[in-house]
Image (cartoon, grey):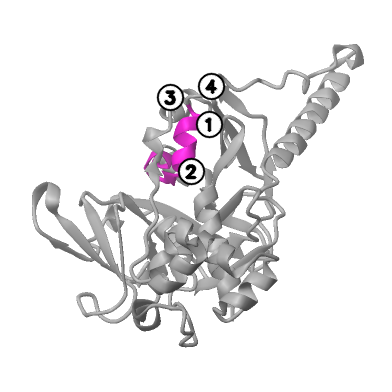
Amino acid sequence: MAKRAPPMRDVALHGIEIAPSQVRGAIRLVPLLRRSVKEDLRFLKRSYQEAATVVSLDGELLAPGVKYISYVPHGLVVSWSDDGTPVAAFGAQMSRPDGKRIGRGPCAVRIAHRMVKREEGNRLRMLPLHVAMEGFLALCFDGPDVAWSEYSKQAISTGLSPRWERVAPGYLVPGLADALRVFEIHDRQVGVLVFVADALASAFVVSHPEDYRALHRSILEDFFGELMIHYGLLPPTGHLSTLGMDAARVRDASDLIAEVERMRAEWASFHGFMAEGLLGRPLSSKQVYQAGPFALQRFMTDLRPSEENHVGEAIVRDDGELEYLKTYRLSAAQTRRAFLLLQLAKHHWNLDATAAGMATTRDDLVKRLSAAGFGYLLKEHVLKAARA
């Protein structure tokens, strides 16, 4: 029986090297190279053409229940072996029907069953990044767990339903398409850190270099925060020329090799420092699926309202090696909304206790909830009293 992968406590690049970055305009791409490539976990892109996808999160495909609605340009088919034997690259054989298509032309909608769905054999279909976003949207989804007098009937009966967030596709980030097109892909490259104006926008990792090459430009179909579009318009990112080779140390070929290794180590350390808002941060995580020795988990960094915060999904091998990673950087507004919801849940949705725990006043908390878009949860007289 396969050993279970441990729950994620942080995003650690076990088995992965950080290579020197490549810069074009405001875009900095940092290649991630796998030290030892295994063949027992492979990824394939499955493209969708519909204008929107409706995912049934519980119950049967078309039955009433909780739904997730978004534009989903592609899914990933994950194939694995339980005993470490190589997995064949199935290619077009795996582009099977997925879900149910309703309508025709530009208004067609895809109805999908579950974010992560087991297919025949050791194959799993997942909707990349949407696994993480669905978990983020479901945060405290049920609303108050006690019928406090301050909350509206809607909040007591339906909680936060419906809840939505706005994102932007990668092809709208200025310069990203050009950078992905012209930059070199390394032989052992399995992933990339994407910086926009030296702000970490996303991280992407897969298990095999061939799969990364096939999925390299799929980053343009991932979603990014709208702030990244504005960052992409900023002046070109510097090349950090202070991190370079010291010619005075080079006297022969062995010195040159040593200097190159030193320089690469400094680059890796520096880029790891640039990504410290994700790498090494404490996480809250939840396992979504166990596939042999691999565990699919979704996570969120510990929320710090004054810093960058990320949600994402990962597949971790039973020895802790990172096999898959996709992340999304939360905007400041999204962070504030999530932080408020977590504080309310922590204090059982009691306004006075939550305000005390946040070292603020009840009226200030009510105003912050209203400004964050959660005013509909509270009765009108509570909102009026706070504003007064």
Work out whether 274 lies above or below 257. below
Q: Whole-percent x and y of residue 237?
A: 60, 23
Closer to the N terminus: mark 1 or mark 4?
Answer: 4
How far is mark 3 from mark 1, CA to CA? 14 Å
How far is mark 1 from mark 2, CA to CA? 9 Å
Circles 3 and 2, Cβ within 8 Å, touching? The answer is: no
According to the picture, the residue beneath numbered tag 3 turns out to be 178
State the SS at label 1.
Answer: loop
Q: What span is colored magenta in the figure?
A: 218-232
Labels 2, 4: front one: 4
Dot 1: few (<14), some (14–19), or many (≥20) neighbours within 10 Å?
A: some
Residue type pointed to by label 3: Asp
How far is mark 1 from mark 4, CA to CA? 15 Å
Residue 252 visible in rendering: yes
Work out whether 17 lies above or below 29. below
Circles 4 and 3, Cβ within 8 Å, touching? The answer is: yes
Residue type pointed to by label 2: Tyr
According to the picture, the residue beneath numbered tag 2 turns out to be 212
Q: Whole-percent x and y of residue 240?
A: 71, 22
Work out whether 310 lies above or below 245. below
224 or 251: which is nearer to us?
224
32 or 286: which is nearer to us?
286
State the SS at label 4.
Answer: strand
Quadrant in which residue 376 is drawn: bottom left
State the SS at label 3.
Answer: helix
According to the picture, the residue beneath numbered tag 4 turns out to be 24
Circles 1 and 2, Cβ within 8 Å, touching? The answer is: yes
